[in-house]
Image (spheres, rainbow, N blue to C red):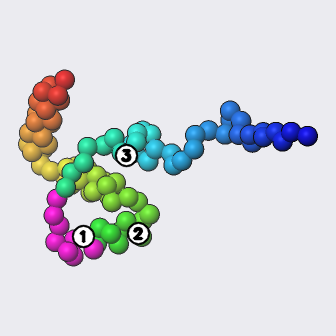
Amino acid sequence: MPITHTSKRNSTTGRVGRPPAGDDGQRVKDYPQVSFRLPRTARDKLVALSKITKQPQWRLIVESMERYLRDLPRNERIKLARLLSRSKRVQH
């Protein structure tokens, strides 16, 4: 009697592996990388905050930056918007 193998997977199972963790379902792997040095105490705080909140370090940095930018004076936010629009034109 031959042994047959049947797969338990069906089309509704979905993909194998972790789901994309980036914004709007993007793969974090596809994000540009950045490298910078932090004082040890700042890095320790970032690592601890990441563990406590169960958020990746990159997301904590992005959220912190967004909050910082919201508190900028209006004239600095305008300058930032101009710089960002210029960089978008250069990229396309």
In the rendered view of the protein, which quadrant contains the N terminus? top right
* Local SS, label 2: helix
Q: Does the magenta stretch include residue 39?
A: yes
Q: Of the numbered discs in the image, which one, if any, rests on residue 74?
A: none
Q: Does the magenta stretch include residue 14?
A: no
Q: Using the rendered image of the protein, determine whether residue 67 is visible from the camera's viewpoint.
A: no
Please name the residue shown 68% across and 32% down the image. Answer: 11
Q: Which of 52 and 80 is in front in this view?
A: 52
Q: Using the rendered image of the protein, determine whether residue 52 is visible from the camera's viewpoint.
A: yes
Q: Position of residue 15 (x, y in %)?
A: 58, 40
- Is 22 on the left-hand or right-hand side of 79? right
Real-space CA distance between mark 3 and mark 2, rounded to the nearest whole angstrom: 18 Å
CB within 8 Å, label 3 to label 2: no
Q: Nearer the viewer, residue 65 or 59?
A: 59
Q: In which quarter of the image is residue 41?
A: bottom left
Decide: is 49 above or below 59. Answer: below
Real-space CA distance between mark 3 and mark 1, rounded to the nearest whole angstrom: 21 Å
Mark positioned earlier in the residue sequence (3 or 2): 3
Q: Which of 68 and 74 is in front in this view?
A: 68
Could you tell me the amino acid type at mark 2? Lys
Q: Position of residue 90 (x, y in %)?
A: 12, 27
Q: Which residue bears the numbered disc 3?
A: 28
Q: Which residue bears the numbered disc 1?
A: 43
Could you tell me the amino acid type at mark 3? Val
Please name the residue shown 13% across and 32% down the image. Answer: 87
Please name the residue shown 62% across and 38% down the image. Answer: 14
Is disc 1 surrounded by few (<14), some (14 to 19) or many (20+) residues within 10 Å? few
Q: Which residue bears the numbered disc 2?
A: 51
Could you tell me the amino acid type at mark 1? Arg
Q: Position of residue 8 (x, y in %)?
A: 75, 42
Per the rendered image, the range of residues in magenta is 36-44
